[in-house]
Image: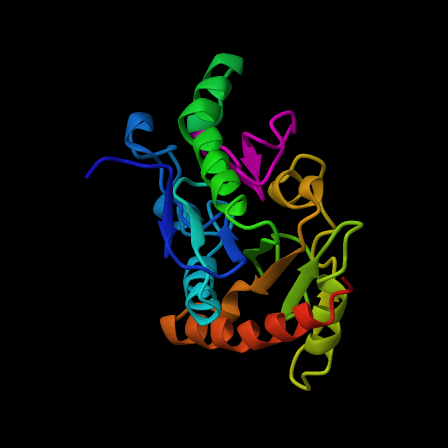
């Protein structure tokens, strides 16, 4: 099978919703030898991808009748949720793990990876987002319950937004009304970074958007991923009705 740096599920779905999963997979492309020199247990960690996020994205896309864009390269290869000038675009150390395959990556290798993986992913995202004048982008990520040497994180779900919180505000209100959820606004990370995927494809175009962070121990199984996709879809639809014109 020919390698491609992204996968689109439901490309012909007609909904104005667009689901993105930047860190869907821990794939290391064949032209990098299929490995960054890390042990399998590190490649299975959150440092390499967002565990569970792909399954949630697919379930959410199916429930909303929306296309789903999945990244098909590890965030350690190059991070599609960073701007091209971001110093964390190509990580050499992450949460206590040195990435051997990135140790000697220079500016030329960085540019090669941008052209081979990062830019095709963003081109696909741009084309999908431009299919509707009123596209709504939902970015799905997951986070680890505890970074090495850090306190445990209490949230079940976080909703991240920058200055445009038209969709995130009512969505957070609906989540907070759920009795079994601990919800974080801009947790476990604050807002957005200039040049990241939401900034590039939503904020700069005035598109409604929100970014969902689910704690990855809650979405380990197919059943859990289906549950969350089906649970979040009606809340997102309800939140969108509350967005001011």
Horizontal and vertical percent position of residue 39: 37, 42
Residue situated furthest top in the rendering: 108
Q: Quadrant of residue 212?
A: bottom right
The stretch drawn in magenta includes residue 13: no
Horizontal and vertical percent position of residue 185: 75, 63
- The front one of 235 and 65 is 65
Residue situated furthest right in the rendering: 163
Per the picture, the main secondary structure of the magenta-coloured stretch is: loop
In which quadrant will I find the N terminus? top left
Q: Residue at x 48, y 29 (%)?
A: 119
Q: Quadrant of residue 199?
A: top right
Q: How many marks?
A: 0
Is residue 227 visible from the viewing direction of this image?
yes
Is residue 76 visible from the viewing direction of this image?
no
The stretch drawn in magenta includes residue 98: yes
- The front one of 214 and 202 is 202
Q: Residue at x 66, y 34 (%)?
A: 195
Q: Residue at x 58, y 44 (%)?
A: 95
Q: Residue at x 42, y 73 (%)?
A: 226
Horizontal and vertical percent position of residue 2: 22, 35
Residue situated furthest bottom in the rendering: 179
Colour treatment of the image: rainbow
The reply, left or right, for residue 125 in relation to residue 62 is right
- The front one of 185 and 146 is 185
In which quadrant will I find the C terminus? bottom right
The reply, left or right, for residue 237 in relation to residue 78 is right
Query: Vertical placement of 158 versus 81: above or below?
Result: below
Horizontal and vertical percent position of residue 162: 76, 50
Q: Which residues are magenta?
A: 77-100
């Amino acid at each position: 099978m020919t390698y491609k740096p992204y996968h689109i599920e439901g490309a012909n779905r007609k909904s104005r919703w667009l689901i993105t999963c930047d860190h869907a997979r821990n794939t290391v492309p064949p032209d990098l030898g299929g490995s960054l020199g890390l042990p399998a247990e590190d490649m299975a960690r959150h440092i390499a991808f967002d565990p569970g996020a792909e399954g949630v994205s697919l379930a959410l896309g199916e429930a909303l009748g929306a296309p789903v864009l999945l990244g098909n390269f590890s965030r350690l290869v190059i991070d599609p949720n960073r701007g091209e000038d971001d110093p964390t675009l190509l990580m050499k150390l992450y949460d206590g793990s040195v990435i051997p395959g990135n140790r000697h990556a220079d500016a030329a290798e960085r540019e090669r990876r941008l052209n081979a993986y990062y830019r095709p992913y963003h081109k696909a995202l741009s084309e999908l987002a431009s299919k509707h004048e009123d596209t709504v982008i939902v970015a799905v990520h997951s986070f680890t319950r505890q970074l090495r040497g850090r306190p445990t994180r209490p949230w079940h779900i976080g909703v991240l937004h920058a200055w445009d919180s038209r969709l995130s505000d009512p969505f957070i209100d609906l989540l907070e009304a759920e009795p079994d959820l601990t919800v974080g606004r801009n947790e476990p990370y604050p807002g957005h970074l200039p040049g990241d995927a939401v900034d590039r494809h939503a904020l700069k175009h005035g598109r409604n958007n929100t970014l969902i962070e689910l704690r990855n121990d809650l979405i380990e199984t197919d059943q859990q991923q289906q549950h969350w996709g089906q649970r979040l879809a009606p809340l997102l639809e309800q939140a969108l009705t509350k967005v001011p014109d």
